Image (cartoon, grey):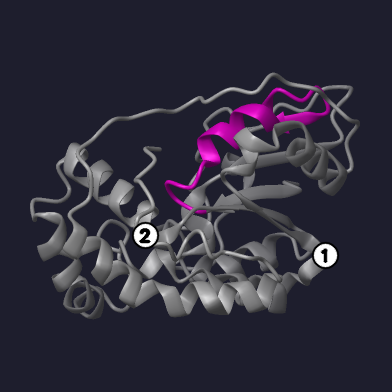
Amino acid sequence: MVDFVIGGVQKGGTTALAKFVAAHPEVAFSSVKEAHWFDRDEDFANGTPDPAAYHRLFTPGPDTRVVGEATPIYVYWRPCVDRIAAYNPEMRWILVLRDPVERAYSHWVMETGRGDEMLPFGQALAQEPARLTKAGGQHRHWSYVDRGRYAGQIERLFARFGRERVLVLENEDLANRHDETLARVWEFLHVAPWSLPTERVFAQSYAPMDAADREFLHHELDPETESLERLLGWDLSAWRARTSPVRPR
């Protein structure tokens, strides 16, 4: 049985956190960073698939206390919540949130690099609502704004699993409060304290975001950020600052 997932968000710092968590001697982490077990709709089309293949991704040892994986789409892809609850109603979730404006641009850079996006960023933003509608409400690739609507995604988790089973982190804390943040993770997972050096395990350079695109994203996402502040009790005024630089991830 898998005990926890690092379930979001895409381009939020899950690669870094997964590397740190996988290094803990009491954690049996998946052999692939992103298992994508619960978001493959085709596998669930005729009912719940046998999880044996999923479990083969993990090799618990004598010191293992928890088993987990990291697939960032889980928190965004709506069917995943019920599927994961059916699999393990006591699943623990770890989320790493990033300024949704910067996350959206980094997401677009990734999609263009993969060849899954051919539109300039501004056009992709303008066409996103129509693309989502055509896809049935969500899209794996063209969801630059939609994935940044964090409050609703987290509320679904709270309702299904309870607040005590959801640990929400801010991605900058992995660098700026590294030891303190990992201590929260170890406590949440009920494993022994473990010290790891601070490390940026991902870095990418790209052109700065166009000012008009940044302003559009703030218009769309600042109300979402305010909802998140109320939900979590965080101060996210830095996210709403129009002059925030795009920090590559």
- Assess whether residue 225 is covered by the magenta stretch: no
Which residue is at the front of the view, 228 or 16?
228
**Amino acid under label 2?**
Val
Magenta extent: 9-28
Q: Which residue is mark 1?
A: 164
Measuring from the top left, give residue 155's x and y in whole percent.
Answer: 63, 77
The mark closer to the camera, 1 or 2, is 2
Measuring from the top left, give residue 37's x and y in whole percent.
Answer: 52, 50
Measuring from the top left, give residue 27's x and y in whole percent.
Answer: 77, 31
Quadrant of the image for the C terminus? Answer: top left
Q: Which residue is mark 2?
A: 101
Task: Give the left or right position of residue 224, taking residue 124 as reference.
Answer: right
Measuring from the top left, give residue 118's x and y in whole percent.
Answer: 8, 51
- Which residue sits at x=51%, y=68%? 150
SS under mark 2: helix
Q: CA distance from mark 1 to mark 2?
A: 28 Å
Residue 232 quadrant: bottom right
